[in-house]
Amino acid sequence: MDRFQRILLLHRLLASHRLPVSHRTIEQELECSRATATRIIEEMRDYLGAPIAYDRPANGYRYTHDAFELPGLWFNASELYALITVQKLLTEAQPGFLDGMLGPLKTRIENILQSEHLGSGEVGRRVRILPMAGCSAGGEYFQTGAGALLQRKRIEILYHGRERDEETDRVVSPQRLVHYRDNWYLDAWCHSVERLRSFALERIRIARPLDDPAVEVADEELDAHFARGYGIFAGEPVATAVLRFTPERARWVAEETWHPAQNGRFLEDGRFELRIPYSDDPELIMDILKYGPGVD
């Protein structure tokens, strides 16, 4: 354990304890000698302004101010690696969307890793994201939609619908941003039809933020509309699909989650029966077809 990690660990140790922490406990937690523990305490006082006081009656150390935080961002090595990995996941899941915003943070994290002789090159070599059937969407529309979503503002969009192959001008109140099967969708209240709708970001041709506040839709109503049926374009379930997989396929399907409200059981002949609520069947049928003769 290096000095950087010990400072972070001591801070977390003192911040999480209401009672003073003994010198022996600090040595054990920091995995160091008494002299090293004393030096870390002094460095935190002198260079980081940590309000560490020695409580003589309790024979331990404590923070005199509960609200103290280490200046800047402090992470241990495993946390820094996790941040680098998440950054790669975000940028490769939809290239270009967050590069500008995450770039400075990524550079800072890499510099910290290198200064600690931990090098971050392995993340780029070892982590791979393989998008399947994903569509490319303009980063500006992602940012406009995400900005309006978090600021609770309406946006005006020019949307191209695939089914009718036509463009329509709509004003929507964003409710949720969803990443589903390598594509981004904006769940929103559409003021043009006065109903909830899900819009694929890659089909948005123009997006313009408005000053009008977004209409709020309760989480329960959003879940009822988008999460009860099967797939991204869900809705109130109208039926239940009953799928029976062959014993060979059963070993795979029994461990999969197709829908939060699914029910599954093994049959006496080794097949696996899966029951799924659905409202619109095209997406469900596409998934069923992947198993060919392995499912009835």
Image (cartoon, rainbow, N blue to C red):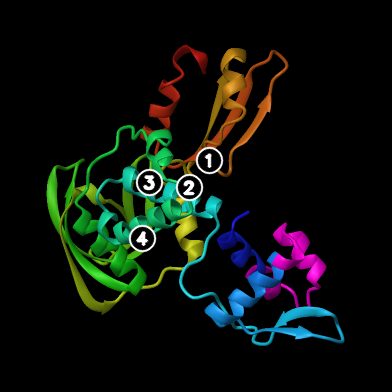
| Residue under numbered circle 2 | 118
| Residue under numbered circle 4 | 105
Locate residue 275, reporting x and y percent. 58, 33
Q: Earlier in the sequence, mark 1 or mark 2?
A: 2
The single residue placed furthest to the front in the displayed view is 35
Residue 167 included in the magenta stretch of the image: no
Above or below, comparing residue 62 to residue 220 in the picture: below
Give the residue type at disc 4.
Leu
Give the residue type at disc 2.
Leu
Q: Earlier in the sequence, mark 3 or mark 1?
A: 3
Q: Magenta segment, which residues?
A: 11-35
User: In this rendering, which labeled residue sits more in front, label 1 or label 2?
Assistant: 2
User: In this rendering, which labeled residue sits more in front, label 2 or label 3?
Assistant: 2
> Residue placed at 56% from the left, 36% from the top?
257
Locate residue 218, reporting x and y percent. 47, 68
Mark 4 lies on a secondary structure that is helix
Query: Which of the 4 image quarters holds residue 99?
Result: bottom left
Marks 2 and 3 in Cβ contact (< 8 Å): no
